Amino acid sequence: MVSPTHPGVYIEEIPNPPTIQGASTSIPAFVGIVGLLQTNLPTANTPTLVTSWLDYQSKFGGLAWNAYVSWAVFEFFQEGGNLCYVVALSTESEQYATANLPTPPGGGNVTALPVYAASPGKWPSNLKFNVLVQSVGSLLSLSVLAELTNGVTKDQILNRYIGINSFSSWTDAGNNNYVILEQYGGINGSDTKSLQALANRINKVSAFIRVGPVDKTVGIAAAASPVPFNTDGEDFGTTPTFASLADTVKGIADVSLLALPDLAAVTAANQGDQISAVLGDLCGQPPSGRNLFYVVDSPFAQDVSDIQTFKANLNSPNAALYYPWVDTYNPITGTVVPVPPSGAVLGRYAYTDVNAGPHVSPAGVLNGALRTVASLETYVSDADQDLLNPAGINAIRRFTNYGNVIYGARTLDATGEWTYIAVRRNFIFIEKSLTDSLQWTVFEPNTPLLWTRAKREISAFLRLQWNRGALFGNTEGEAFYVVCDETNNPPEARASGILYIDVGIAPVYPAEFVVIRLAQKSASPA
């Protein structure tokens, strides 16, 4: 406040009143299993901010088989995401299968080069997963193998991976058949520098194994037959439990999206139970829930009937189910890998939010185009989607001239009140924006001055949303209303310390069904 002491012109700078800022809606939390990283692994069960795929690699390692968080984060950034959080499940070193490779003959105290499965669990043993070291002239080659029985492995996901790629095969002396998933050559098994170069290459490239640490006491030699993995540790790959991380995810203030991609690889029954627990604890509406929006992956190898049965027990306005799995291109190895769709889908959510807004559906040939998806686990026809769409199952489809596209925009809400993702997420956006930006009203005197200021700021924010097309109406009065006066703040409410602000908005619904009406026009008589 200026206190004039002489005649003249005085300048007084007045601070702007608090305004409502749009809340972030494009930051997801990916919860689950990460690959094995030898050093500097962030604290387990703790949210870690990740700003790029390179940032993820530096903190959690690379792409890892049976650790679908890595693939989901990779796809998220490839499809347009900018920021995410990763919550890694706690795992111990003994939970990673190990392979006891042979040591060089006459090596004295030399021990075997440590080789670990890239992710925890017993899956390497269940698949008869092996590592083979062979002599190639004066050097060695190391191969990652999976045993075939009647042309297939014991795992459906690995069978698809083998089927959509061109891998060489190998047969041992006992006529057992293997497929060579990865191969690394040019190794001197007794030279530390050669082994360190091998470890660096494998740890950067391999989806199946990690190697190291390397020092002068380790080495490898050729083996007459494949070396199996030992799996004495606890199996996190069969029934991981994610619902226990609810409180951790609730504590991440700027997260509004959620994915648990590893759940898609467990049995459908276990997946359904855990999804229901997460929906109830994390995705409920305030005040009991966090209002997170959960992108649910379908289980692997489900037909249309299976996925309808799976979805029947899921009900939430704050979740959406996507079907089927997608095959993403791994630029490091040049292979195509089957993965749950949530990472790619959330990338399109983030892209659409930034470029259009949460009121626009992340679906269709524009906003739903999955540019990094090479193919789909199964192809959905019009007849299939006639069954999927009414059930609230969002199909991912392939269209000529457009490629692979998210072609569904519905939530898992069974009541019919929140049918569309864009409508629900726009409400979440507005609710969160008002909650975050109106904190200044708390403890202010509950007077007409406060009512006027609050109404003015909310109206200005909603007017901005209307102007950008997020609300429906030809006029402001049709698009929204804000009431904050003596009509909804009677003396008894004020005496209880309560300020009521009633807000109504007219949502914009997506044009899900486009009907073009054509009629034959008759020529007018002359």
Image (cartoon, rainbow, N blue to C red):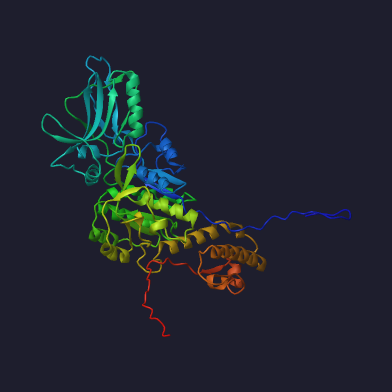
The number of discs equals 0
Where, quadrant-wise, is the C terminus in this rendering?
Answer: bottom left
Where does residue 142 sit, x and y in percent of width and height? Answer: 25, 28
Whether residue 173 can be seen here: yes
Q: Residue at x 72, y 56 (%)?
A: 14
Residue 287 rendering spot, x and y as whole percentages: 47, 60
- In this image, 15 relative to 55: left or right? right
Estimate the x, y position of residue 388 in percent, counting from the top left: 29, 63
> In the drawing, does residue 93 fall left or right of residue 284?
left
Does 10 sit left or right of 175 as displayed?
Answer: right
Find residue 193 and report its horizontal and vertical position in percent. 35, 20
Q: Residue at x 63, y 57 (%)?
A: 18
Q: Dividing the picture into quarters, in which one does residue 117 lie?
A: top left
Residue 407 or residue 131, whichever sits in front: 407
Looking at the image, which residue is at 24% across and 27% down? 100
User: 85 or 82, which is in the foreground?
Assistant: 82
